[in-house]
Image (cartoon, rainbow, N blue to C red):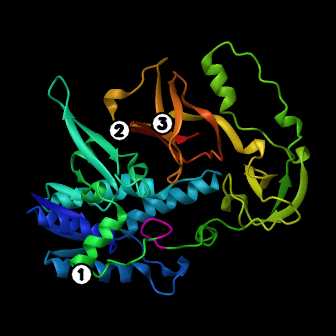
Amino acid sequence: MKIVVGLSGGVDSSVTAYLLQQQGHEVVALFMRNWNDASVTLEDECPWIEDSNDALMVAQKLGIPFQVIDMSELYKERIVDYMFAEYEKGRTPNPDVLCNREVKFDVFMKTAMSLGADKVATGHYARVNSTFDENGKEIFHLLAGKDNNKDQSYFLCQLSQDQLSKALFPIGELTKPQVREIAKEIGLVTADKKDSQGLCFIGKVSLPQFLQQQLKPKEGEIVEIFKDSPLFSEEIPEFSSKEEELIFLSRKIDYKKADGKVIGKHQGAQFFTIGQSKGLGIGGHKESCFIVSRDMENNIIFVGEGSHFPGLYKKALKVDNAELHWVREDMKLKNGESMEVMSRFRYRQSLQKATLYQFEDAFYIEFEEAQSAIAEGQFASWYIDDELIGSGVIA
C-alpha cells in the first residue's frame, strides 16, 4: 500500500513511518506547516522550522520521500478564527480535536489521496479496526491506545466513518517508552525529543497573549461567591419527566454581582475558563479560588474558594442535537432512548460512568458522580469498553 505519514518532527510520527516501512508499505512523508507567526510563541525560535528540520532528517534516515505543505491559511481560518470566536462567546474550545477533524483528516487527507495514497497514518496513540455488519457493510471502530497514559482517542472523537476508513495509527498498540526505545535502536534524531506542548502545530504559547491578538483586554471585576450562598441551598424540585430533571441538573447558575463580593480585577473574561485558578491574582484565601462562571455581557468573573466549591460541580451536561456526532452511526440513539457508557470531557480526565439520553430538543449526559468544571464549548466523548462511539460540543 502507498501510505502518506503526517511527519510532525516528533518521535511518535517518526516511529509510525518506520513501522510502516518495516511492514513493506510505500511510505511518503508530508510535513504540515500550519503556523507562520513566531511572535506569540514562548520560544525564541519558530518551532515549525526546528520540527520541519527534524522531520526531514527522519525521512532522510529512513530513505523516504519528504515534502512540506503549507496549510497555514486554512489552519487560521478553520482553527484559530474558530478559537477566537468561541473564547469571545465565553466558551472553551479544544483546538486539537478540531485540528484532527478539519485539517489532518480532511484537507491533509484529501491532499494525500490526490498523491495516490491508499491510507493516511499519524502518530496518535489510538487504534482503528473494522468488522462487517449483517448486510456486509464495513464498520470502523475507533479504539483507545494501549498505553493508558498516552491514549489520544479523545482528540479523534469527531472523526467520521469515512475518515477512519482511510486512517492508520501504527503506534496505538505500543507504549510511549516502547516507541522511544524503537527510535533509539534505529538512531532517529527524534528519539529523546520532548513531547510538543501547547496548541496543535503552533507550539507552546501563552493563551492570553495569543488571544490578545484579536480579543482586546478590558478591565472587569472578580466577584467571590460564598459556599453558604442561598444559590446552593435550593431544594431539588419534583420532576414530571426525566428530561425535566436533566434540564435542571445541567443548568447554568445565573450569578449576579449582588450574589457575592468584589475581590479583584481582571483584564477580560474571555481570557479565562471554568475551573481555572491560575492567573487570577487573588490572595488572602486558605485555598485557591476557582472560576465557576463568567458573565460575558458585563465582563464579570465569578469565583469560589476551594476545589470542592459547590458551584464547580454538575451532575449532567447538555449537547445541542446539531452539535452531536456519532463515530458509530449505527449506534445513534433515537428520541426517548438511553445508553450506559463511560464518558470524559477533557483529554486527561479518567473515564466516568454515565448515561446518555436522547430527546427531541437536546441530548444529555448524566454522570453517576457530579463532575467538576464542565465548560461550554468542550467536547464530551463517550465510550463502550475501549471504543469511542460518539462526541458532542457541550452547550
Please give the name of the residue rendered at 48% of the width and 36% of the height, measured from the top-left corner.
342
Q: Is residue 178 magenta?
A: no
Return the x and y of residue 166 as percentages of the image width and height: 21, 50
Magenta stretch in the rendered image: 197-203
Task: Using the image, tell me which numbered label, if any, was put on residue 187.
Answer: 1
Mark 1, secondary structure of its residue: loop
**Is 320 left or right of 30, judged from the image as shown?**
right
- Inspect this view and state whether residue 223 appears: yes
- Inspect this view and state whether residue 69 appears: no
Please give the name of the residue rendered at 67% of the width and 37% of the height, measured from the top-left corner.
314
Mark 2, secondary structure of its residue: loop
**Is 165 left or right of 346, judged from the image as shown?**
left
Pick whichever, 184 or 356, lies toward us.
184
Quarter of the picture containing the C terminus is top right
| Quadrant housing residue 75 | bottom left
Tag 3 residue:
342
Residue 395 position (above or below residue 242): below
Q: Are marks 2 and 3 in contact (CB under 8 Å)?
A: no
Q: CA distance from mark 2 to mark 3?
A: 15 Å
Pick whichever, 375 or 343, lies toward us.
343
Return the x and y of residue 306 as percentages of the image width and height: 78, 53
Pick whichever, 148 or 226, lies toward us.
148
Per the picture, the main secondary structure of the magenta-coloured stretch is loop
Tag 2 residue:
327
The mark nearer the N terminus, 2 or 1, is 1
The mark nearer the N terminus, 1 or 3, is 1
